[in-house]
Image (tube, helix red, strand yellow):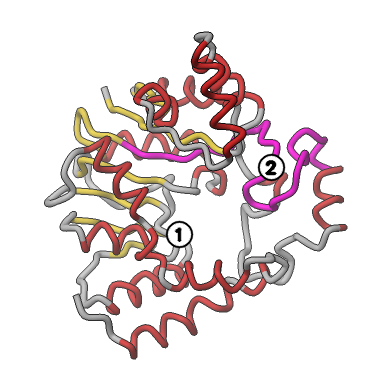
Amino acid sequence: MPVSTASSADLERAIDPWLAHMRWRRDFARWRERRINQEAYQGERLARLEQLAGRLEALQALDLGAGMGGFAVAAALRGAHVVACEYNPAYCRITRLRAERHRLSLPVINAAGEALPLPDALFDAVVCWDVIEHVQSPDRVLHEIARVLRPGGVALVTVINRRAWVDPHYHMRGINWLPRLWAEWLITRRGRTKQGAAFRDMQRLSDMHYFEYHAFVALAARHGFSVRDLREEDLLRGTLHSPKPVRRIVRAALRCVGLERAAYRLQRDWYAGMFELGLVKQ
């Protein structure tokens, strides 16, 4: 589908103020490019949704916490019927500009995940990437996800590990093993706060909702969901990718003695930065 260069320029101008606070990143230029062209980098997430929900064509999907709209636009380009829901009004505008760049008519709703202005049982699938940690009430958001899903519908969610060794937001080692006050002091000392950014809420480490794995599974179960650990399923299928050769060697050795799955679960509970989960509505 043709891309509008005028919309692309407008999109860059709208996005740049939301990136300035991350200039400490060594890969800032590449990271910025991926934000501007976010819809071009959604292959893994699209494949994940297709793995869980089936063919994307005509799938009724809600992108909850759509952010800058990369996934919603990418899914719509693949034929899904997507509604993008985002709490930040500026991100809603960015999502509309991204959709206009591809001449897409994409519904965009400005609302909080705790109170979705949508009818019951409307969607086959909900995606909620990098959102749970930032909401006011994860419990209420899960209630709303369950409400808008049809019976048998699925939700793809990411959840930050309370024991994450490398924090996914601040890219610092060990801070989640410290008392939050100490961690906040270190973040400030390293110059990695979001002070001066356009964000206003639920961005400080001490404000965000991180979960131990089994605590989140129990919370989801209270809302009628069974939980699938999608990375563990990759492991069992033999499709879990380890980028470093040494990790592949260690995994092969553990597999030979029947301990690969146990080692994965240990790593998931005590080290991994994020859980990637499929929630199935019962």
Determine the image quadrant of residue 272.
top right
Q: Quadrant of the C terminus?
A: top left
Task: Name the kind of residue labelled 2 in the image.
Answer: Val
Residue at x 23%, y 33% (from the top left corner): 153
Across and down, in percent, residue 64 comes to 37, 51
Q: Disc 2, disc 1: CB below 8 Å?
A: no
Q: Is residue 279 above or below residue 198?
A: above
Which label is found at residue 146? none
Q: Which residues are magenta?
A: 155-181
Q: Residue at x 51, y 37 (%)?
A: 242
Tell me the kind of residue under disc 1. Answer: Tyr
Q: x%, y% of residue 275?
A: 51, 34
Residue 97 higher or lower than 157, as above or below: below
Q: Earlier in the sequence, mark 2 or mark 1?
A: 1
- Where residue 87 is drawn, which disc sits there? 1
- Given residues 32 and 210, the one toward you in this image is 32
> Does the magenta segment cover residue 169?
yes
Q: Badge 2 is on which residue? A: 166
Q: Quadrant of residue 29?
A: bottom right
In percent of width and height, residue 172 lies at 74, 48
Q: Secondary structure at mark 2?
A: loop
Give the residue displayed 33% in from the left and 54% down from the top. Answer: 43
| Residue under the image location 66 percent in, 70 percent down | 197
Q: Nearer the viewer, residue 249 or 210?
A: 249
